[in-house]
Amino acid sequence: MKFFLFLLLLITIVSNSADIPSSFSKAKKLALTKVYRDNHKSFYCGCAFNNKKQVDQASCGYEPKTPITSSGKENIRDNRIEWEHVLPASKMGSHLACWGSERSQFPKCVKSNGKLKSGRDCCQKVNSDFRNAHNDLVNLTPAIGEVNADRSNLPYTEIIGEKRSYGKCDFEYDSVNKVVEPSEEVRGDIARIQLYLEDKYGEVLGFKFSDDKKLMLEQWNDQDPISDWEVERNKRICKAQGSGNNLINECK
């Protein structure tokens, strides 16, 4: 009987061992070593990268938009992979008390020197729902650092014309209207990621997409069907954190 209870406890521990990463650093490590372990291809541009997250620009015809920074230094972000939130952290948390000036009320959000941590860091410390949404592997994709920086928290849309800022990379950046356009090849991926996040975290975090945005995402979902890689990616996410995007397939 004691052995049976021990076995039952062991099974319970193992079954609950996979969970959404408790920190962004852990999430990034899992994304690289578990989810994208043998699919080193950047999300927006399709560029190859190695285990050290160094980008092979020639593999996709990538040309840096800003090879030299305003300070005269080489822009190292055009040669490295960073982990992009398809749904920006600010969209999920900027309206929360832990993000704005009210975060001073949270002791965990005050540094030892008396200064406040950023809203993003504060919310990860004090709001478990935000922390889960922020570190959910479904929301993380590998992007060239320069593209990640330009995208920032700008919304996706469809831009008239095909002005390319990054060589052959089909990612358009409109600095005037503050919007970006991803390639048709990943629009369905984006739609399913963002719709999943709104469904899972929107109510508890208090964010909701506009009707126009939802319509665009639903159209992108229809126009760009689920790929074999999306299915495999979601299976790996399920294994790594115990949950995944049910718009792709259910975790088993």
Image (spheres, helix red, strand yellow):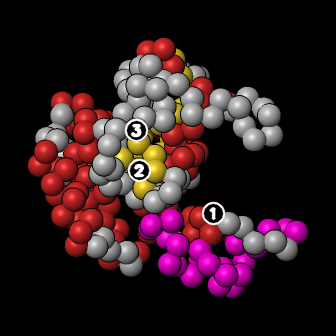
Q: Secondary structure at mark 3?
A: loop
Q: CA distance from mark 2 to mark 1?
A: 26 Å
Categorize mark 3 by other alpha carbons within 10 Å: few (<14), some (14-19), many (20+).
few
Type of residue at label 1?
A: Asp
- Give the total number of marks visible in the rendering: 3
Left or right: 233 as drawn, with respect to 126? left
Give residue 182's position: percent from left, percent from top: 34, 43
For the C terminus, which image quadrant? top left
Can you tell which of label 3 and label 1 is closer to the viewer? Answer: 3
**On screen, 205 above or below 158?**
below
Left or right: 45 as drawn, with respect to 186? right
Q: CA distance from mark 3 to mark 2?
A: 11 Å
Q: Which residues are magenta?
A: 90-113
Q: CA distance from mark 3 to mark 1?
A: 35 Å
Type of residue at label 2?
A: Val
Residue 129 sits in quarter: bottom left
**On screen, 70 above or below 16?**
above
Q: Residue at x 57, y 38 (%)?
A: 146
Categorize mark 1 by other alpha carbons within 10 Å: few (<14), some (14-19), many (20+).
some
Is there any visible trace of residue 13 in the rendered image? no
Q: Residue at x 25, y 52 (%)?
A: 191
Categorize mark 2 by other alpha carbons within 10 Å: few (<14), some (14-19), many (20+).
many
* Nearer-N-terminus badge (3/1): 1
Q: Which residue is mark 3?
A: 163
Q: Which residue is mark 2?
A: 180
Give residue 201's position: percent from left, percent from top: 35, 68
Q: Residue at x 48, y 14 (%)?
A: 58
Can you tell which of label 3 and label 2 is closer to the viewer? Answer: 3
Q: Secondary structure at mark 1?
A: helix
Can you tell which of label 2 and label 1 is closer to the viewer? Answer: 2
Q: Which residue is mark 1?
A: 121
